[in-house]
Amino acid sequence: MPKHFMTIDAARKDLTAIENSAVDELLAGRLDRRNFLRHGSVLGLSLPFLASLVAAAGLGTQKARAEGKPGGTVRAGVATPGGAIDPVTYYDSGSYQLVFQTAEFLCITQPDLTLKPVLAESWSPNEDGSVWTFKLRKGVKFHNGEDFKADDVVATFDRLADPNGASNALSVFKGLLSKGGTRKVDDHTVAFHLDAPNGSFPYSVSIDNYNAVILPASYKGDYEKTFEGTGPFRLESYTPKVGATFVRNPDYWGEKALPDRLEFKFYGDVQPRILALQAGEVDILDAVPLDVSQVVLNSPDITVLRVASTAHRQLHMRCDTGPFTDKRVRQALALSIDRSKLVDGLCRGMAATGNDSPFAPAFPATDKSVPQRVQDIAKAKQLMEAAGLAGGFDITLTTLRYSDIPGYAQLFQNFAKEIGARIALNIEDQDKYYGKAVFGQSDWLDSPLGITDYAHRSVPNVFLKSPLVSDGPWNAAHFKSPAYDGMVTSYLKALDIGAQRAAASDIQKLLLDETPVIFSYFPDLLVPVRKNVSGLPPIAAGLLLDRVSIG
């Protein structure tokens, strides 16, 4: 037996059946290196161990990144926080970019979507994925000197899962984790008892769920006064509407941060942020929209980090409102779209093509053998005629003024015109569009036709549930399908990558047939930095600045 097979076989003896199924997928060529590392890390296998299996299988190793020099101040330009900063309730980038510097997660996603342990050292599921046990890191202290223990993790997730609270994380935890489901085993072990089995639960307690930073059990609010956490930086000063500064935490449990200091400046709009970067007033911006990216892409002093993302613009059609009660009309509109013009023109090639389901190409479970929907005007017209709408129809598309969405709406209006759909555009400010974000009080959820922005997630769980299951709180399409609901349940509980892929394939095919929503493209995340900046990890979740160096 070749030596590398002996190495793999020896390692496999200590793996569970689910973990060995991932190795089978790797050796059969159904999982590439990236997706094997990603899936194995979700199951709680260490990245060095997984990398050793990859190397033994002859699939190469990842090169270590050169470390930057310590010292100096890193200046970041971000959006003005939307209100008082509270990790339990915040939802905006300007707020969480600050908190990410001072507070930490149990684990974080990396550029290849693997999970890296942070405050958790390891984790593992029970046989059906209904209980996940996390071993916590010892010797960690909060900035106030308190020891980090299991009580802090229990209190954090009880706050976030409290249905009577204002937690923004309820969109993740509803039906997944209830208050009381996070239980202390000992001072450095917690067990999450889930409402239903879930094969990718660790992402829900990672940076992918930006509310899930670990706060002290004693936390009562007023976060802006302390920015309490276990992270590599401590608060120096915070001035609402102006900015914030942080300094290196000398007592940090891990590698000490490279920068001495971070300086955040707040901007009410993206244009002043770009001007500040061009003028050298800041070194880094949070992500910029596609519609302004050309300004920084053409600048000789600026580098734009392109991060493959699962963010998307979901175009919904209300299945309970004419003419969209007939799926042939929904299919016809989807067939009218020239997706290549959207990817190559609107997005300047910085996007992946969508196939009318949340399964982006970046997800390992996506069944890439499902035929890609392409523009077919003749077939679309046939469907319109079969639905009794050969003469077309009139409808208003309501959406928000954000990034590339108005441009997408105009292009969609032109595409639809070719099959007789006469679409009027109603483009609103974000506050008006979202309203109170509940049915009956939201243009987003009540409009017969609309386009909504969805931010990046490392797993499709939220995309599959909240906007599309029959009782989903974000189901703007008013789509109700018991068959779909059952498929999503099968997907979410699957621990085995083969079972996930099979369920994903069923979902993709059902959504192509029903077409309650259209996913035309998944735009890249674009993060501009000045040329002398190095060490910023290209992850879609947000800015992590502890390894950044200014040359």
Image: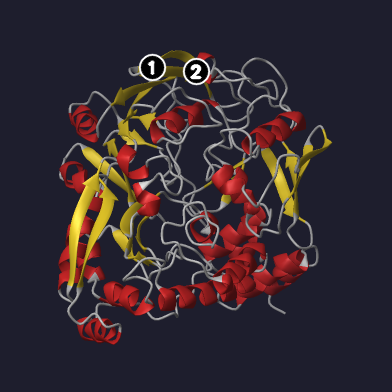
Q: Nearer the viewer, residue 142 or 384?
A: 384
What amino acid does circle 1 point to?
Answer: Pro
Q: Report which quarter residue 93 is drawn in.
A: top left
Q: Secondary structure at mark 2?
A: helix
Query: Cβ–Cβ below 8 Å for labels 2 and 1?
Result: yes
Report the side of 513 relative to 233 (left or right): left
> Is residue 25 depicted above or below 242 in this figure?
below
| Mark 1 nearby-residue class (10 Å; few <14, some 14–19, many ≥20) | some
Rendering coords of residue 249 (x, y %)? 55, 19
> Is residue 3 depicted above or below 167 in this figure?
below
Q: Nearer the viewer, residue 26 or 94?
A: 94
Rendering coords of residue 86 (x, y %)? 52, 26
> Is residue 426 depicted above or below 302 in this figure?
below
Residue found 72% across the figure and 67% down from its top: 18
Q: Please report whichever mark, 2 or 1, sits nearer to the chain's N-terminal start.
A: 2
| Residue labelled with disc 2 | 224
Residue 60 visible in this rendered orientation of the protein: no
- Label annotation for residue 316: none
Rendering coords of residue 228 (x, y %)? 58, 20
Which quadrant holds the N terminus?
Answer: bottom right
Which quadrant holds the C terminus?
Answer: top left
Residue found 46% across the figure and 50% down from its top: 111
| Residue labelled with disc 1 | 240
Q: Disc 2 to disc 1, how far (Cα)? A: 9 Å
What amino acid does circle 2 point to?
Answer: Glu
